[in-house]
Image: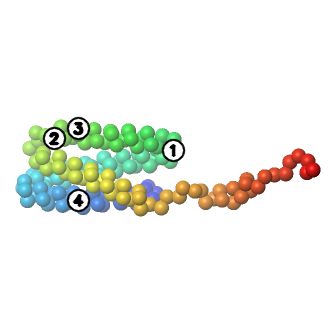
Amino acid sequence: MPSQDARNLLQSAVPTAAVGAIVAAVSGVVAGGKGAIGAVVGTLVVIAFMGLGLFVLQRTAKSLPQLFQAMGLMLYVAQLLLLLFFVAIFKDTTLFNPKTFAVGLVVATVAWMASQARAHMKAKILYVDPDSHGDSEKKDKPEKSGSST
């Protein structure tokens, strides 16, 4: 994974993990050990899904840039539907508290999206290609053609 891709992943995953740890601690106090496990599992599911989605989206941007926006919208809808699917599957589990699992999913998803939006706003993304600067000066000057009279 190139360094920019890893940086993008870390800028979203680290704050999400920190928020997940807080939710796990609160869930542990409120709902006991199973509550903490539910919040941790929910946070890990979000980090895995969103991290995989970020990887897929970055690969799409490099190989098929014309599909980037459509792929991003489709990917977020698919991720949210999969998270809803996980809530439905684990609603009656006895492995952990399903309510804290759902809270962990929601809070971690919001934290991921907020940290991703912050990282995007802080990124220094060039909107002008600096390599083409010299070529544009040559293209701006009209060439002489036709008679000079």
Q: Nearer the viewer, residue 50 or 137?
A: 137
Q: Does the CB distance between marks 3 and 4 fall below 8 Å? A: no
Distance between the Cα atoms at labels 1 and 2? 37 Å
Amino acid marked by disc 3: Phe
Q: Which residue matches tag 4?
A: 19
Sequence-first disc among 3 and 4 = 4
Sequence-first disc among 1 and 4 = 4
Where on the picture, by quarter, is residue 129? bottom right
The residue positioned 7% from the left and 56% from the top of the image is 30
Q: Secondary structure at mark 3?
A: helix
Q: Secondary structure at mark 2?
A: loop
Residue 124 image point, x, y percent: 48, 61
Amino acid marked by disc 2: Phe
Q: Which residue matches tag 3?
A: 85
Q: Nearer the viewer, residue 85 or 94?
A: 85
Q: Quadrant of the N terminus?
A: bottom left
Q: Does the CB distance between marks 1 and 2 fall below 8 Å? A: no
Q: Which residue matches tag 1?
A: 65
Distance between the Cα atoms at labels 3 and 2? 9 Å
Q: Residue furthest right?
A: 149
The residue positioned 22% from the left and 52% from the top of the image is 107
Residue 79 vertical position relative to residue 40 in the rendered view, above or below: above
The residue positioned 44% from the left and 49% from the top of the image is 58
Sequence-first disc among 3 and 2 = 3
**Left or right of residue 103, residue 71 in this image:** right
